[in-house]
Image: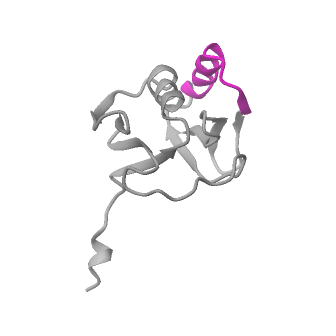
Amino acid sequence: MNALKKIRNIDYTIIFARDMRRMRRFYEGVMNFPVHSSLGEGWIAYQVGSCLLALTERGVMFDDAPPPQGALSLQLAFRVAPAEVDECAQALREHGVAIEKEPTDQPWGHRTLFFRDPDGNVLEIYADI
């Protein structure tokens, strides 16, 4: 049997931050994700439901060149209850976050909201409708 078939979930996702201070302020101050663990200034993990979302700087483990500024490389989707999509949009606006695509009911059965973090990663808040 192929041992890789035993994988059952994604435990954590790591974002290689361009600007660690701005990213930390965003994920802690705007998204309000609780800190799970920290290994100093170059690594921090947040608890997001049953998963961890970590931020790190290049050079801690890997030192690849960052993708060009403006190049889309990552999208994260966060699920909430249906009524909360619009509430999240309002909370983001109050923090001065630009909304890329306003809350919209999609034909595939999601209500979606799109915005970006300070590094330009696309973030989605959605609900099953």
Identify the residue at the far top of this view: 94
Up-down relation of residue 69 to residue 116 (above or below): below
Identify the residue at the far bottom of this view: 1
Coordinates of residue 15 in the picture (x, y in percent): 48, 46
Coordinates of residue 51 in the picture (x, y in percent): 35, 44
The residue drawn where x is 32% and y is 42% is 50
In this view, the residue in front, 108 or 113, is 113
Is 90 inside the magenta-drawn segment? yes
The residue drawn where x is 60% and y is 16% is 95
Is residue 61 left or right of 103 when viewed as pictured? Answer: left
One can see residue 129 in this view:
no
Q: Which range of residues does the magenta coloring cover?
A: 84-101
In this view, the residue in front, 121 or 69, is 69
Residue 93's quadrant in the figure?
top right
The residue drawn where x is 61% and y is 43% is 121
Coordinates of residue 30 in the picture (x, y in percent): 52, 22
